[in-house]
Amino acid sequence: MKVDVALFASLASFQPDGLSGRHTREFDFPDGMLISEVIASLGLPDEPRVIFVNGRHASEGAALSAGDRLAIFPPVGGG
Amino acid sequence: MRGIAMPETRGYQMRELMRVNMSDLSIKMEPLPAKWARYGGRALTSALVFTEVPAMADALGAENKFVVAPGFLGGTNTPNGGRLSIGAKSPLTGGLKESNSGGQAAHALGKLGIAAVIVEGKAADASARYMLVIEADKSAKLVRVDAWAGMGNYALAEEIKATRPADDHFATITTGPAGEMGLKAAGVAVSDPKGYPNRFAGRGGMGAVMGTKGLKAIVVSDKGLSYVEHADKEAFSAAMKVFANALTTHPVSGQGLPTYGTNVLANIINEAGGYPTRNFSDGRFEGVENISGEKMREVTLERGGNVKHGCHTGCVIQCSRYWVDKDGAYVTKGMEYENVWSIGADCGIDDLDAIGLIDRECSDLGLDTIEMGATLAVYMDAGKIAFGDGAAALAAIKEIWAGTELGKTLGQGAEVTGNAFGVAHIPVVKHQALPAYDPRPIQGIGVTYATSTQGADHTAGYAITANVLAVGGSVDPLSPEGQAGLSQGLQIATGMLDAMGFCIFVAFPVLDIPEAFGAIVDMVSAHTGDTWDANALLAVGKETLTYERLFNQHAGFTPADDRLPAFFKTVPLPPHNVVFTVSDADLDSVFDFVPETAAGLGIS
Ligand code: SF4
């Protein structure tokens, strides 16, 4: 299944192609892939993170569906 | 002339008020009333305005007062403890305003032992301009500077510098032409560590209050003055270590903010679908990548610009930066999340250089960039210029220099502009433009916008923390549940932080690391030699809000003023296609502590 994965701030460099400037890449994952499995496959550091699927907060144990957009941020703030 | 203050006389008990009368040009020192011994910053500006300014006063008249106060810990070595409060009756909201700024002035005033400068009256001659000069020995004078009338903040900074000895160390507080014209979007500029007039008490028209009094500038010298001493130096140092450690180890304040600045928020708020785009008609901006904090950092580094410094001495988080042009020359401060949003996404502009130029123009004119971006967006919504047209937006802002009819309309802010051009959706509460988070998919911030004494203001109770950022717990942003309680707790805590003089970004670690809050209690206790506890600190927050709330009631505010504009409840926002659903009863519960606090203060 096709899923968009976006990585931001300090996580952006963990995209497999290592290119900066753009945050989102399309991936082809097996059906029912868990967010935790995506995190492991990308080798994201074992640090706190904030996860969205289709603009809503999601937990690492959730499974993805075809066409989803997964976005992962390190903890950020400002204002 | 007073003698040079000695360190032991500069403890917190010795703080004084400086009263400057623009009508008779007198300057007097007064002791700080004992009942306000635990106040600084916003607590003091709000208590003073509540006590001394009639609620029905003309905000641009002689009865209003322009009050400048360093936080309670201003002038000490407290990490991130050098923020400045500027208070007055607001010409924009009509209520009691505290506008908060970084920059060097708070520490300078604090070191001098000045708890607040109260500027009252109004220059008899409307063409007169004055500069208030406060020397490091606490002597002060009003100097006539008529030639500086109409001067922008940057040229003004150069002129002021030329009047000072080469070895001086001073901070400036200035108003640009927008303030002199009495425009409601006029802010007050405060100099940063390099002397740039780029830190702003932007919101609520404080620049107009200053300017219409005939006060063009305040200069405060702290040359040769050391930090204010603590009653218990060792205990203070121990608590300070715990506090500084929390600030530098929490991922938000220790990594995200220093690396990317506040604009690190652009992508995450956009992702959450709450990034107001083209006058609050969409929750996502297709151009966000081009104006994100990540992009700003990349471009600034390519151009050789600075990407990390404090807005004032003593900041350990350091979210400030400078925006430079293609040749590496300074343009303006590194734009904050709010400015990039207001001039950028809200106007459909996805070009950081265009945003930087408009930010610079607003800063030079002395205008609140949040209000002005929202105003441009409303003007674009009226079809007067196209969304996304940065050159036309800059040209519109430039009209304000000459005070043309269009310029003066824009300078009054989003509501006046929206009404003048017949715009249906005007995003304001208590006449002040909403900042950079749409309250439909992020309902907690909607509670703060609706109920804050300040008008729509994100900083008053930054519910983005638990709603979006997973800081300080987690509350579903799309649900009305729990939002009123969240906003209330944050508004009280913010009142306290603003009173103490802390940068509100200390809240990120404080909300997550219990020892960090304990360290604030310990630092304040060690500084004063009195015993404080969490309740005593939060009492200052509640009292601050109580002065503001009561003043607003006396000025005619009712529960109907604690509401969002109707379109937020009726027009769904993509991509989540939701409206604001927090009940009026919940909104009306946010200030339920006020009667009891007012009774305790003996005010009504
Ligand atoms: S964190 Fe940013 S806003 Fe806060 S004091 Fe430091 S530079 Fe100023």
Image (cartoon, coloured by chain):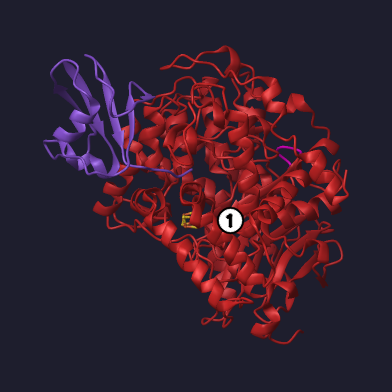
Residue B297 point in image, percent of width and height: 31, 48
Residue B136 or B98: which is nearer the viewer?
B98
Tally the marks: 1
The answer to whether B299 is drawn above or below residue B281 in the figure is: below
Residue A51 or B54: which is nearer the viewer?
A51
For the residue with label 1, is its CB less than 8 Å from the closest atom of ligand 1?
Answer: no
Quarter that holds the N terminus of chain B? bottom right
Quarter that holds the C terminus of chain B? top right
Q: Amino acid at mark 1?
A: Ala
Q: Which chain is red?
A: B
Residue found 64% across the figure and 61% down from its top: B71
Residue found 41% across the figure and 52% down from its top: B253
Residue range (magenta): B90-94
Instruction: Locate residue B266: give its quadrant.
Output: top left
Note whether residue B169 is visible: no
Residue A17 point in image, percent of width and height: 11, 36
Note whether residue B173 is visible: yes
Q: Which chain is purple?
A: A
Residue B226 or B20: which is nearer the viewer?
B226
Magenta stretch: residue B579 in it?
A: no
The answer to whether B62 is drawn above or below residue B40 in the figure is: above
Instruction: Locate residue B414: give its quadrant.
Output: top right
Q: Chain of mark 1?
A: B
Look at mark 1 in the image and give the residue it sits on.
B189
Residue B139 point in image, percent of width and height: 73, 79
